[in-house]
Image (cartoon, helix red, strand yellow):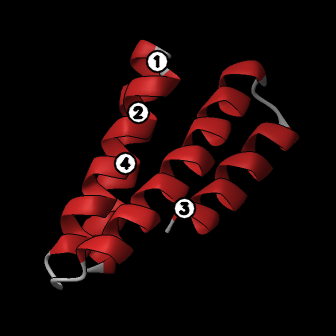
Amino acid sequence: MIIIRVIIFATVVKIFFETENAWACAAILAGVTFFLGSLTGLFAAALVSSLVNFVLALGYFFLLGRLEEGVIFWVVIILGALMLM
């Protein structure tokens, strides 16, 4: 399951760098979180998890859009990836 999340996260980050649309990328991650969470049958937990993931991903992508490439940029990329996994 974690491999799927890593692949999807890397794909969404690539989409973000091409489109710079934080809302769409956060919605994609939240949708994937809901889908993967609903496979367990716990829909309420999947919904709460996807909403939390949406808010965190939205902040993450907005921050990535504001930073220029440098040391802090890469720290944010790594910490955000760990946070959203």
| Residue 33 image point, x, y percent | 32, 61
Q: Amino acid type of disc 1?
A: Asn
The residue where tag 3 is placed is: 84
Give the spatial CA distance, label 3 vs label 2: 12 Å
Q: Would you identify the image quadrant in which residue 32 lies?
A: bottom left
Q: CA distance from mark 2 to mark 1?
A: 6 Å
Total labels: the figure holds 4
Residue to which mark 4 is pinned: 29
Identify the amino acid type marked 4: Leu
Q: Are marks 1 and 4 in contact (CB under 8 Å)?
A: no
Q: Residues within 10 Å of mark 4 (few under 14, many from 20)?
A: many
Residue 21 is marked as: 1
Residue 38 at x, y percent in the picture: 19, 72
Q: Amino acid under label 3?
A: Leu
Do residues under tags 4 and 2 come within 8 Å of each other at their CB atoms? Answer: yes
Using a 10 Å C-alpha cutoff, classify the residue at mark 2 as few (fewer than 14 neighbours), some (14 to 19) or many (20 or more). Answer: many
Measure how far apart labels 1 and 3 are at the Cα level. Answer: 18 Å
* Secondary structure of residue under mark 4: helix
Q: Nearer the viewer, residue 46 or 33?
A: 46
Could you tell me which residue is drawn at 66 percent across and 22 percent down? 65
Residue at mark 2: 25
Asked whether disc 2 touches disc 1, contact meaning CB atoms under 8 Å apart, the reply is yes
Q: Relative to 33, is 60 above or below?
A: above
Tell me which label, 3 or 4, sits earlier in the chain. 4
For marks 1 and 4 on the same chain, the one whose residue lies earlier in the sequence: 1
For marks 1 and 3, the one nearer the N-term is 1
Label 4 near label 3: C-beta < 8 Å? yes
Residue 71 or residue 33, whichever sits in front:
33
Q: CA distance from mark 3 to mark 4?
A: 9 Å
Residue 49 in which image quadrant:
bottom left
